[in-house]
Image (cartoon, helix red, strand yellow):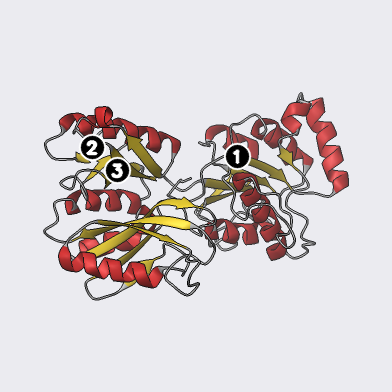
Amino acid sequence: MLDIAEELNRWVEQGRDFAVATVVAVGGSAPRQPGAALAVDADGTAIGSVSGGCVEGAVYELCRQALDDGETVLERFGYSDEDAFAVGLTCGGVIDILVTPVRADDPARPVLATALTVAARGEAAAVARIVRGPAELTGRALVVRPDGSRVGGFGAHPELDRTVAAEAGAFLDAGRTGTLEIGEQGSRCGAPLTLLIESSVPAPRMIVFGAIDFASALVRVGKFLGYHVTVCDARPVFATRVRFPDADEIVVEWPHEYLGRTEVDARTVLCVLTHDAKFDVPLLKLALRLPVAYVGAMGSRRTHLDRNTRLREVGVTDLELARLRSPIGLDLGARTPEETALSIAAEIVAARRGGTGASLTGAHTPIHHDGPTAPAGRIGSVA
């Protein structure tokens, strides 16, 4: 649900009634991950997607039905061996979808509205909903913020509220979205529960060092992938808004000095496009010691070898150098700035998801990978 927070938040502000279908769990080769959502308002307008097209029509009708009767339902969709044209996932996967009405008289509406507002602002929060459990709890929600404050709850079950808030806080800390099983004893309400917990976290950062033409193309691709993109260069004549209209932030400063003072985390990607030793060496010496997701540097193979020699001379270890993606990008035969940006982006995605970069044609490897880190964008399910 939070992956379409901006649009849903506008619907809330406009006073629209709507129903939202959220992917709860997936199995096999399902196209969307937990947290993906499709919403339908009272006029029949639809936004979002839960399956990339396979079951959208059926889910649309479930949303219309939920708007009519006010009932929350959990539905499973899978491939039908008897009739390949039946409602199901022709890719062979299985998805469980929670359909929740969000009408003006729904007691959970203010709670979900809070979650949508926070997510639309790009702030951090987690929202927990009951997927399976007692009927009186189905459809209720609880929102948790990083400071531990919470909104909503599950009626006359304060101990359950505390339990869910603690679990949702842990999901939020990890930037995860997924389901959680709570046993009968742990639920404190006399029955086992299944929760869907969605995390909204600020967009991950992409910092592009070097205000060159290749950087302009990479900025556009980075925005497309959901990153908050910063361009940094020490030369004010190049680091301008005119040259980088799509960047979220433009910084005129020595790269290593900026990197030393700005905030990075385990989702941050650093792309060094300067291929100039006076910028690269102090920058990479610092970058390779930071807990970031990706460090890549542009340059020819000769530049790469020379740069590695210089980095060793300033104390960078072989273990630290092993983290460096250089020359940057996957081998696509790229030549233009746009092709090169695609090559770099492909390597970033492969690193994040655990992909090989090999062609899928003729391969027997999984199409979808569970990568080592959370995806780009607001929802982490694990973009």
Please tell me which residue is depicted at 74% across the width and 53% down the height of the picture.
330
Mark seen at residue 265: none
Residue carrying label 3: 128
Report the mark closest to the observer, 1 or 3.
3
* Amino acid carrying mark 1 in the image: Ala
Q: Are marks 2 and 1 in contact (CB under 8 Å)?
A: no
* Amino acid carrying mark 2 in the image: Arg
On the image, the x and y values in percent for residue 332 come to 76, 60
Counting residues from the start of the chain, the first of labels 1 and 3 encountered is 3
SS for tag 2?
Answer: strand
Q: Is residue 16 visible?
A: no
**Which of these two is toward me, 313 or 297?**
297
SS for tag 1?
Answer: loop
Counting residues from the start of the chain, the first of labels 3 and 2 encountered is 3
On the image, the x and y values in percent for residue 224 come to 54, 60
Q: Quadrant of residue 318?
A: top right
Please tell me which residue is depicted at 23% across the width and 56% down the height of the picture.
72
Please tell me how crowded label 3 is: few (under 14), some (14-19), or many (20+) other residues with Cα within 10 Å. Answer: many
**Which of these two is toward me, 98 or 257?**
98
Please tell me how crowded label 1 is: few (under 14), some (14-19), or many (20+) other residues with Cα within 10 Å. Answer: some
Mark seen at residue 293: 1
As drawn, 258 above or below 68? above
Quadrant (top left/top right/bottom left/bottom right) for the N terminus: bottom left
Cα–Cα gap, marks 3 and 2: 11 Å
Horizontal placement of 204 versus 109: left or right?
A: right
Residue carrying label 2: 150
